Image (cartoon, grey):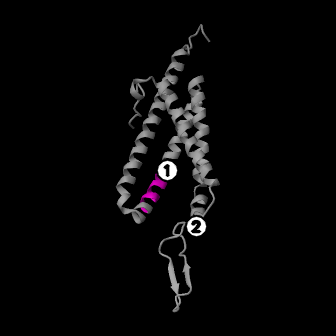
Amino acid sequence: MPKIPKLTNAFFGFSLAKGTQIVAISFIVLFSIVFVGHLVQAFIPLHDVEEDSSTNVTSSDNSTTTTTPTPPSVKFADLRSATFFLEVSVIVQIVFSVFLLIGVQKTIQDYLMSWILLQIGFFFHSQVLVIANAVFALYHYPTYILYFIGQEILVIAIVTYCILVVYSYYRDLQSTDEAEIPPLTPGNG
């Protein structure tokens, strides 16, 4: 079974500890912006979007004109209710990213590993959502499907690199701890 590659440096030659801090702060900032965006969206009042294709009914004497609007094509309330899982996921990402930052500053390996396991879990779960979104995009927006696929490949590459940076730092901490443990000898135990 092939081993997971171990990086020696993080972004632009930074140390793995500094790279892990950059990952933690970036995830905290990014997911906080997404969370604030969801809060703002939750308090925007709903209004119906009317299409231009409304039907005009005119009587024969041209004295009364009645306009009957067509129903809106997109229901924003349905979209909001469908994003509940995303909002919970964002909160979980923020909490575990804070744990990652604390784990880097206090060199607590369990905090680093919990962040790594969370990212791997979200990675596999998000692939199901990516496939569902790709089918939706292909059906509703076929001209943007290559943009969507490119965006997903870029996000997967960035998150995978971040996981590698944190895991490499985790392995460095493990090797440091193993070096500090004195071997058991007959006069030592």
Labels 1, 2: front one = 2
Image disc number at residue 23:
none
Secondary structure state at the residue bearing disc 1: helix
| Closer to the camera in the image, 164 or 105 | 105
Q: Is residue 140 left or right of residue 62?
A: left
Q: Residue at x 52, y 88 (%)?
A: 62
Secondary structure state at the residue bearing disc 2: loop
- Magenta span includes 132: yes
| Closer to the camera in the image, 168 or 85 | 85
Image location (x, y in percent) of residue 147: 37, 53
* Residue type at the position of mark 1: Ser
Q: CA distance from mark 1 to mark 2?
A: 31 Å
* Residue type at the position of mark 2: Asp
> Which of the 4 image quarters holds residue 114?
top right
Above or below for 185 versus 81: above
Q: Is residue 8 left or right of residue 87?
A: left
> Which of the 4 image quarters holds residue 110?
top right
* Figure quadrant of the N terminus: top left
Image location (x, y in percent) of residue 67: 55, 79
> Which of the 4 image quarters holds residue 188?
top right
Judging by the rendered image, the residue that carries numbered circle 2 is: 48
Q: Residue at x 46, y 59 (%)?
A: 132
Judging by the rendered image, the residue that carries numbered circle 1 is: 126
- Magenta span includes 117: no
Above or below for 28 versus 173: below
How many other residues sit within 10 Å of disc 1, few (<14), some (14-19) or many (≥20)? Answer: few
Give the magenta part as a residue range.
Answer: 127-135
How many other residues sit within 10 Å of disc 2, few (<14), some (14-19) or many (≥20)? Answer: few
